[in-house]
Image (spheres, helix red, strand yellow):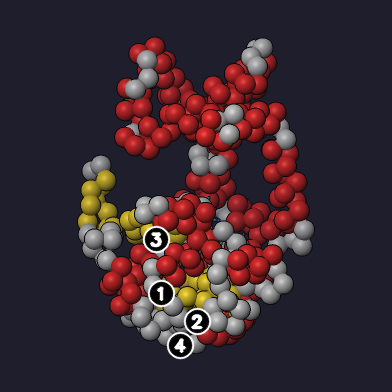
Amino acid sequence: MKLKFGSVEENVVTREEFPLEKAREVLKDEVIAVLGYGVQGPGQALNLKDNGFNVIVGQRKGSKTWDKAIADGWVPGETLFELEEACQRGTILQFLLSDAGQIALWPMVKKHLTPGKALYFSHGFGITYKEKTGIIPPADVDVILVAPKGSGTSLRRMFVEGRGLNSSYAIFQDGTGKAKDRVIALGIGVGSGYLFETDFYREVTSDLTGERGTLMGAIQGIFAAQYEVLRANGHSPSEAFNETVEELTQSLMPLVAENGMDWMYANCSTTAQRGALDWWKPFRDASKPVFEALYESVKSGKEAQKSIDSNSKADYREKLEAELKELRESEMWQAGAVVRQLRPENN
Ligand SMILES: NC(=O)C1=CN([C@@H]2O[C@H](COP(=O)(O)OP(=O)(O)OC[C@H]3O[C@@H](n4cnc5c(N)ncnc54)[C@H](O)[C@@H]3O)[C@@H](O)[C@H]2O)C=CC1
Ligand SMILES: CC(=O)[C@](C)(O)C(=O)O
Ligand SMILES: [Mg+2]
Ligand SMILES: [Mg+2]
């Protein structure tokens, strides 16, 4: 249906419009093979299974995530297979290996993309940067995308709570004439809230910007800047952490989520409202050039190249873990660990 977002009209799909029963009908003869069992793999595979679809998982035997898949109820030889066997058996191949991992596996996956099958992504990366990834699908298959706008962990948690994480959807190639029904049915099946339309290029450029920007990169940057200023001016870690992070995640962001920024403001003191209304624009103006540089870096393909280069190395996991450790061991997040322990619900 068409819905207005502000003054702009968009194409969206809701569960009322495309109920689960319809999704099941559309996909009743399909075998959905979820390839990879990292973060999105478990969320999407388990939600699809609980929603009544035929799902199998493809994962490397002997890996830690193979054991995790077994612990989650997937049965070797019945619903859990080596990647190649899953590609053989599946009619819809959900390519949920890491974006860098997809490059190495592509020649094998391609071999099993026989006419009529569908290749499904949760990111526009592999297709948009085909010069870097080599992912060029044959013409007689569907190439579709459902990109949940959040972690696979949240996708699963929200499903279990009876909620839904919003996703975008796109069709890159309609090889069978059934791509539209297939992609919407899968979007509903993985547990999306509502689905909004995009294309592979827009999905990857907005997603790379968002995760580097407000969602993950910028938020840590702004936390660190304020924390450091407070500490440099003699405030304790407890005071600095509460005033920077804990109050935001525990008290104020839930209010923003519920009813918008103005409503959160309205539930704070007039003193706070005066200051926030004065200061949000200087913060916007100071950070906007950084966001513009970030978008340029995404658009030029530089961000994609960096991600491929670093995540294709044999020791990429160890390198990432070392950098996460540095973050975890910073004073701000050490303070955070203590503050979390002290939440009454945690003891
Ligand atoms: N992490 C998330 O919640 C989100 C991820 N996505 C997209 O979903 C897709 C999957 O992402 P994640 O679940 O984060 O992936 P991930 O980084 O957790 O990796 C998934 C699986 O790929 C396997 N893998 C990596 N390299 C491999 C190789 N060379 N050979 C065989 N297996 C290999 C890993 O062992 C793991 O089981 C990506 O396209 C990503 O951009 C989209 C939205 C959110
Ligand atoms: C969770 C999500 O949507 C991200 C941040 O884009 C990702 O994990 O790539
Ligand atoms: Mg994302
Ligand atoms: Mg992403």
Q: Nearer the viewer, mark 4 or mark 1?
A: 1
- Figure quadrant, ligand 1: bottom right
Q: Nearer the viewer, mark 4 or mark 3?
A: 3
Question: SS at mark 4?
Answer: loop
Q: How many marks?
A: 4
Q: From the image, tell me which residue sits under label 3.
A: 191
Residue sitting nearer the eye, 139 or 272: 272
Q: From the image, tell me which residue sits under label 2.
A: 90
Vertical placement of residue 59 versus 276, above or below: below
Q: CA distance from mark 4 to mark 1?
A: 22 Å
What amino acid type should be assigned to the residue bearing mark 1?
A: Phe
Instruction: Determine the residue located farthest toward the front in the rendered image.
Output: 347
Question: Sequence-wise, which precedes: disc 4 or disc 1?
Answer: 1
Q: Are marks 3 and 1 in contact (CB under 8 Å)?
A: no
Q: CA distance from mark 2 to mark 3?
A: 20 Å
In the image, the residue with mark 4 has its CB under 8 Å from the nearest atom of ligand 1: no
User: How many residues crowd around disc 2 within 10 Å: few (fewer than 14), some, or many (20 or more)?
Assistant: many
Q: From the image, tell me which residue sits under label 1.
A: 53
Residue at 44% x, 29% y: name it. Answer: 251
Q: CA distance from mark 2 to mark 4?
A: 12 Å
